[in-house]
Amino acid sequence: MQSAKKTSNKYITLLVMFDASSDPKSFRIRMSRLKLLAGFLAIALLFFTGSLIYYYAYSYKIFYYDDLQKKYDQLVVDNKRIKLIERQYRLVKQENEKIRMVFGLLGNVQDSVGNGPGRTTVANEKNLDLYSYADDNLSRSQIKGMDQERAIPSDYLMYTKIIPSLMPVNSRFISQGFSKGNKMNDLFGNSSHLGYDIVAEEGAPVKAASDGWVVMADWLSDYGNTVILYHGFGFFSIYKHAQYLLCREGGFVKGGDIIATVGKTGQLATGTHLHFEIWKDGIPQDPAEYIPQFQDILKVSTVRH
């Protein structure tokens, strides 16, 4: 008890001289107060150190959480993009397969009415599966009979019915001509332009180039409203970017019948026009070789190829 009392009565004297000429000043600090001050400073230092550690730990967690949240958000966006790309890929693949199946781009189409060259029909389903796009009213025997009926056609039937020889739209201007490029058999080849872009007013009638069966009348993302006619003996004609479709799959049309109207539908449409193609045995043909009006237009027009 006396020892504790003696300790509390002890002092520490500090002498402070502000300069050499001044008298020193003394400060007395009780030992107990000095210990109290030291304890307070120690507690304050511990509190400061703990706060600093907590702050950095919390800041790291916040930064780490924000980084994880950003990565998660990016993964969600990427996942949506991947799903969208997958969906677009499936649609394009389906359209590609659909068109290729209609055209029989694998080649080697068999002749069902004889052994003469060039007489191709829909008898070989591996190359030309038209029946899956026909109506209930369009049977296999009907299409097959169409070629059999024309096995020995007259000159008139050859040029006015079997071969697509009629101008599909009334126009005297072509914005882009036919060019096979390096990919003759690639329907989607960027180096090729497999038909004519015929400029006409929106809503102008689009006519069948000759008699034929409507094997496709549907929407395609790149080409918009599209009509594909099969004319027999491997001949097809294609009409893209239409405003409206005026025929139905499986139906039969005669040359000159209105099957659609001119439009600018589809992602690849750059303006109001009809994109017209002719295919023979799975190979794109220059329409000018079958339709004389195209040759006349090409003589007086500057056409981009």
Image: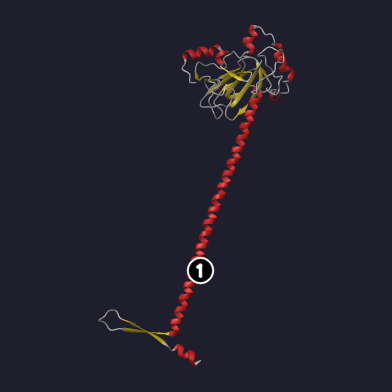
Q: In this view, does 150 lie to the left or right of 83?
A: right
Relative image position of residue 72 (x, y in whole percent): 57, 50
Which amino acid does the dot numbered 1 rest on?
Gly
Figure colour scheme: secondary structure
Q: What element carries label 1?
A: helix
* Residue at the (48%, 12%) spot, across then down: 299
Relative image position of residue 198 (x, y in whole percent): 53, 19
Q: Looking at the rendering, which quadrant does residue 285 occupy?
A: top right
Callout 1 environment at 10 Å: few (<14), some (14 to 19), or many (20+)?
few
- The answer to which of 63 and 296 lies nearer the viewer is 63
Relative image position of residue 222 (x, y in whole percent): 57, 29
* Residue at the (55%, 53%) spot, across then down: 68
Does residue 235 sit above or below 36 in this rendering? above
Q: Looking at the rendering, which quadrant does residue 81 occupy?
A: top right
Relative image position of residue 38 (x, y in whole percent): 45, 78
* Residue at the (46%, 90%) spot, across then down: 6
Does residue 157 sit above or below 103 in this rendering? above
Q: Identify the residue at the far bottom of this view.
A: 2
Q: Disc 1 marks which residue? A: 50
* Residue at the (46%, 81%) spot, across then down: 36
- The answer to which of 168 and 17 lies nearer the viewer is 17
- The answer to which of 137 and 34 lies nearer the viewer is 34
Q: In this view, does 55 lie to the left or right of 210?
A: left
